[in-house]
Image: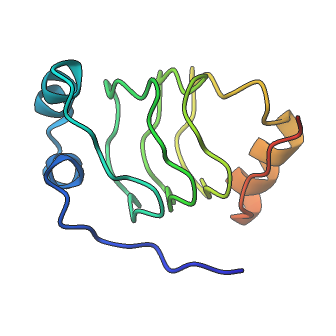
Amino acid sequence: MSRTPEIKSDPMYQLLREDNATEFNERKAKGEKADLANSDLRGMDLRGLDACGLDMRGCYLRQADLRGLDLSDTLLEGASIKGAKISGTTFPAALSAEEITLSLLHGTCMRNSR
């Protein structure tokens, strides 16, 4: 089942499109929810994003800058990271190194192994 990544009207998503992870994090800390599932996040600089607890399933993260992010508590099943910058990124334990590598190199959608 293939999904087309969406450009959403969600205000929190729009903050990321505007390269404003700082305000995103502040609003998230105050309890504002973000609708990011199946989002088009390609090419975005997401460094500094507080991704803890975010639902990023099905996201299209092609060539996004994910360096240094802690994604260990982020839902990423079905997300694709082809060509993303991932140096220093921590991924969920449920994603195998092989799944991450296949997605990084070939754009496959990542599947949880547990």
Q: Residue at x 44, y 36 (%)?
A: 54
In the rendered picture of this protein, how many numbered marks are placed on residues?
0
Left/right placement of residue 43 relative to residue 80 reads: left
Q: Is residue 45 above or below residue 59?
A: above
Up the image or down, 71 lies above or below 65; here it is above
Residue 88 relative to residue 114: left or right: left
> Does residue 74 lie above or below 11 as drawn?
above
> Quarter of the image containing the C terminus?
top right
Residue occupying image coordinates x 60% and y 53%? 81
| Quarter of the N terminus within the rendering | bottom right
Residue 18 placement (x, y as % from top left): 13, 51
Q: Classify residue 91 by image quadrant.
A: top right
Q: Residue at x 14, y 22 (%)?
A: 26
Residue 21 relative to residue 110: left or right: left
Foreground residue, 112 or 89?
Answer: 112
Residue toward you, 36 or 15: 36
Front one among 5 and 67: 5
Residue 28 position in % (x across, y down): 22, 27
Quarter holding residue 103: bottom right
Residue 97: where, in percent of width, then height?
A: 84, 34
Percent position of residue 68, x then y: 47, 21
Colouring? rainbow
